Image (cartoon, rainbow, N blue to C red):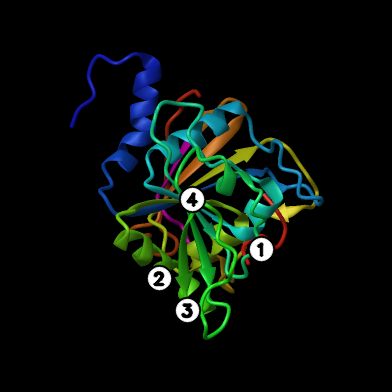
Amino acid sequence: MRWRDGSPEADDLADRYLPLCLAGPHVTFAQLGQSLDGFIASRTGDADYVTGEEDREHLHRLRALADAVVVGAGTAVADDPRLTVRACPGDHPVRVVLDPHGRVPLRHQVFTDSQAPTLWVVAAADEHGAPARRPDGVDVLTLPDRAAFAPRNLVRELARRGLGRVLVEGGGVTVSRFLQEGALHRLYVTVAPVLLGDGVPGLAFPGPDLMRDALRPPTRRTVLGEDTLFELDLRTPPHPGEPLDQEHTGTGQARDEAQ
């Protein structure tokens, strides 16, 4: 496929998103926005906003390219997100809230605004079944236990519902679990030129003892206003120590959050 006669802005968007568009009906990808020192929110959980407007537009484009957008319960509790497509044209994805203990308040927008379908994923309370709370108009998926919340199992459950293109949006714990278990095909990390000193970390998972054994996937970089977007292709990671990136120059959440 070749892109012809586009404006410079259209050329940038095609270059940035065409690989994801062509990834097929079953692809799992994630997005995080963080400070230069690796935090997605301040120590109080404030994340409004770590990255700039261009990155928020990028996030909405990712939502528009997904069948489902996934968040952990902590992010849903702390941020009360809408998880809809507003900054660009496109359909809203199904909003998937991972909430084993059923602790997301029923007053939150994903349960009440009726702007997009919501799938509330909970664990069975006991042998008698799911928690009693069931928000009106919200689909509930009850999994037998916490082990069933493993990322690969969740992806399979969503695919059974016709939700094959899955965006994992937050927070850091949830994205890290998907990355650690090899459940992501692509990862987008936007880094803002701001230093927080401490706060809610972004990616965190058990790493190797030696630097040469670190994960070094093929990577592209894009300028988004004052921020830098890193796009990591996780489908076929190179062997440790291999060169990883190419560069192009287009213009262009809360502590303890996943349980």
The amino acid type of the residue labelled 2 equals Asn
What distance separates the C-alpha of mark 4 from that of mark 2?
Answer: 25 Å
Q: Depth-wise, is mark 3 or mark 4 nearer the camera? A: 4
Q: Which label sits on residue 137?
A: 4
Mark 3: amino acid: Pro
Residue contact at pointers 4 and 2, CB within 8 angstroms = no
Point 30% across, 39% down: residue: 21
Distance of mark 3 from mark 2, alpha carbons? 12 Å
Specify the quadrant of the image occupied by residue 7.
top left
Residue 22 at least partly seen = yes
Q: CA distance from mark 3 to mark 1?
A: 17 Å
Q: Which residue is mark 3?
A: 144
User: Which residue is at a point 61% across and 56% down the rendered structure image?
Assistant: 172
Local crowd size for mark 4, using a 10 Å CA cut-off: few (<14), some (14–19), many (≥20): few
Across and down, in percent, residue 71 comes to 55, 54
- Please state which amino acid type lies under the numbered disc 4: Gly
The span from disc 1 to disc 4 (Cα, nearest Å) is 18 Å
Instruction: Name above or below for residue 106 compared with residue 85.
Output: below
Query: Is 246 or 101 nearer to us in this picture?
Result: 101
Which numbered disc, 3 or 2, marks the residue that appears first in the sequence? 3
Which mark, by number, is residue 153? 2
Q: Which residue is mark 1?
A: 103
Q: Neighbour class for label 3 at 10 Å: few (<14), some, many (≥20)? A: some
The amino acid pointed to by label 1 is Arg
Label 2 – label 1 distance at C-alpha: 21 Å
User: Nearer the observer, disc 3 or disc 2?
Assistant: 3
- Magenta stretch bounds: 215-222
Query: Which x, y percent locates residue 147?
Result: 50, 78
**Dot 1 and dot 4 residues touching (CB under 8 Å):** no
Q: Upstream in the sequence, badge 1 or badge 4?
A: 1
Label 2 residue SS: helix
Q: Is residue 182 visible?
A: no
